[in-house]
Each structure stands twice: as C-alpha cells, then as structure tokens.
C-alpha cells in the first residue's frame, strides 16, 4: 500500500514541477460578441448603434474573432471563436447542424437590422430578448433523422448564445410577409425563455388539467383536447406531451400560430381548451406580451 502512496506523491510532484513549464496564455478577457473598440466601417457602426439602442449584440457572421495561444510544445496557433447555437449549459448537441448564408451587401444588413429593431424588438418585452442576434440572408437546418441529415430552410433558430434569424431581402417583403416573420420570430424568442415565467403565475392555467399531468400518456382521455391538452405533441415519438412544460409550450406556440378567431373556431368543441387559452393570454399580457 505504501508503494502506491509513494508513487502517487511522486506523480503529483512531477505534475507540479512540469506545470511550471506550461506556456502562459493569460490574456485580457475579450467579449467577442461586442464590436472591437478600434473597428471602423459601416457594419461596425451599425452593430454599435444597434447594441446602444437595444442592449442586444448584433452579429452578421457566426465567426466572432480569434486569439493566439501557445501550445505545450511552444507552438503559437490561432484559436477561432465561433457562435455555437447548439451549445447549452450542460452539453453540446450534435444531433442537428446549421448552415449560414451571410449578407454580402451593407444595404441588406441595414434593412434587416432596422426591421428587427423597429418592428420586432419594440413589440417584445426586454425580458425575452436574446443575448445576441445573428442576422443572415438564409438559414438551413440539417435535422438528424435516424442518422440522415435532412436539410430545410428556417426563418429562426434559438440558442443560448444567440438567436439566428434569416430575413432574406426584407426591404422587398410585403407587409403580410413581414407580419408572418415577426410572429414566427417573436414566438421563437418567447418559447426559448419560457422558464422565465413563474409557476405561480401559471397556477390557474395548470388547474384545468392538473389530474392528468405526468401520468402514463395511455391513461389520458382521448381526444386529449377533452381534458385541456393540445394535440401538438401527443403523437410525437418519445415525448411525454402531458407534462406542465410541454402543455405551456403547446399553448404558447398555438396562440402565435393562430389568430384568436381561428383558435376559437378550431377548438370550439372543447370549452376547457378555450378557457386555458384565455388564461395563457392573461399570463403573457402580465409579462408584456400582447398576442390577442
């Protein structure tokens, strides 16, 4: 036993000694999301003004910047900082991936930034603002479908580091197209921050279906609307649709997907669904979100 302890002590000592020879990579902390102090040009000024007015970092590329680091062998290499929309607090998700098609013309960048600032964020409470917004002309999501990546264009993708938004040539879009885009993006930003809504504010909403939360999905009466659940995730593989979190998610998504008239028409047969919708609208209004 003593020789194992002695071996451990020697290993620790060797590690401590060798650690002194490690290269120093101490550098001033850099916020790669912000515009560098010395940066000039139209895009730099556009990004600065956007942040000054909204408090949200504006990006036009998923590549943020770089720094030089020294390896253990003494070699100096360049380390690039890139936005990782799949990153979260626990792990990195490699199930899906994203393809970005950046704007090439400053005029399109200015039009996209103006739309987000004047028409999107002005109607959204700051509580639901993302940390940063990555504006692109096109955004392609490659979803992992049983090992095969299936591409599809999307308008928005929310991550913890940033929300990526594809607006195309927004200056040529019709008012109807702009309104559709705005609703879709607002929905994504709110859905990405639903955890900010307190459970106590959802107590009345939960009360309608309280007897059916977290039980076996087979024991939930059919149709699920009869006890206040929406069918959005009821048929999804490996998803427990009758949890409180998915119940809230389904209602928020449906409220943004449908006009109030269409919602009432769609679920007219189920009074409990209409009442839960009305309660969710009240909760959203309390947090500054006016949908209906």
Image (tube, rainbow, N blue to C red):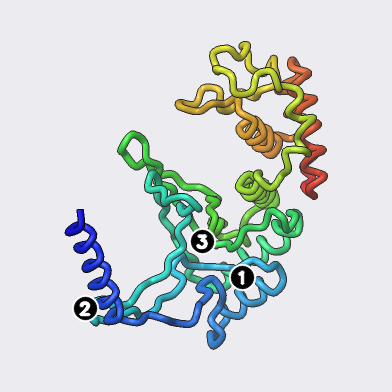
**Measuring 46% from the left and 54% from the top, which residue is drawn there?**
87
Label 3 crowding class (10 Å Cα cut-off): few <14, some 14-19, many 20+?
many
Q: Earlier in the sequence, mark 1 or mark 2?
A: 2
Residue ranking furthest to the front? 2
Real-space Cα distance between discs 1 and 2? Answer: 45 Å
- Contact between marks 3 and 2 (CB within 8 A): the answer is no
Q: Earlier in the sequence, mark 1 or mark 3?
A: 1
Please indicate whether residue 69 sits to the left or right of residue 63 in the image.
left
Real-space Cα distance between discs 1 and 3? Answer: 12 Å
Residue 84 is situated, as x and y percent measured from the top left of the image, at: 45, 58
230 versus 251 height, above or below = above
Secondary structure beneath dot 3 equals strand
Residue ranking furthest to the bottom? 38
Question: Which residue was labeled with disc 3?
Answer: 136
Label 1 crowding class (10 Å Cα cut-off): few <14, some 14-19, many 20+?
some
173 versus 22 height, above or below = above
Q: Give the camera-side residue of 291 and 233.
A: 233
**Measuring 62% from the left and 58% from the top, which residue is drawn there?**
130
Question: Which residue was labeled with disc 1?
Answer: 110
Residue 284 is situated, as x and y percent measured from the top left of the image, at: 77, 42
Real-space Cα distance between discs 3 and 2? Answer: 39 Å
Question: Which residue was labeled with disc 2?
Answer: 73
Label number found at residue 95: none
* The quarter of the displayed image where residue 199 is located: top right
**Measuring 30% from the left and 38% from the top, which residue is drawn there?**
147
Residue 186 is situated, as x and y percent measured from the top left of the image, at: 67, 49
264 versus 256 height, above or below = above
């Amino acid at each position: 036993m003593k020789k194992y302890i002695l071996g451990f002590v020697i290993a620790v000592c060797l590690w401590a000694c060798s650690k002194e020879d490690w290269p120093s990579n101490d550098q001033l902390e850099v916020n790669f999301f912000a515009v560098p102090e010395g940066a000039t040009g139209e895009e730099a000024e556009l990004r600065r003004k956007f942040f000054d007015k909204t408090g949200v970092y504006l990006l036009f590329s998923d590549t943020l910047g770089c720094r030089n680091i020294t390896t253990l062998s003494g070699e100096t290499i360049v380390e690039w900082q890139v936005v990782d929309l799949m990153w979260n607090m626990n792990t990195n998700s490699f199930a899906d991936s994203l393809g970005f098609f950046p704007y090439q013309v400053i005029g399109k960048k200015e039009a996209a930034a103006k739309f987000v600032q004047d028409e999107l964020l002005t109607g959204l409470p700051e509580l639901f603002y993302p940390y940063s917004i990555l504006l692109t002309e096109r955004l392609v999501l490659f979803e992992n479908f049983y090992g095969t990546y299936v591409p599809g264009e999307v308008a928005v993708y929310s991550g913890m580091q940033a929300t990526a938004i594809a607006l195309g040539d927004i200056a040529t879009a019709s008012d109807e197209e702009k309104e559709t885009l705005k609703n879709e993006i607002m929905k994504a930003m709110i859905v990405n921050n639903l955890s900010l809504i307190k459970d106590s504010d959802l107590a009345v909403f939960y009360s309608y279906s309280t007897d059916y939360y977290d039980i076996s999905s087979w024991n939930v009466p059919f149709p699920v609307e009869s006890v206040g659940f929406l069918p959005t995730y009821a048929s999804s593989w490996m998803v427990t649709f009758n949890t409180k979190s998915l119940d809230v998610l389904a209602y928020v998504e449906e409220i943004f997907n449908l006009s109030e008239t269409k919602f009432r028409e769609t679920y007219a047969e189920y009074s409990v669904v209409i009442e839960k919708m009305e309660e969710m609208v009240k909760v959203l209004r309390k947090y500054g979100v006016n949908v209906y």
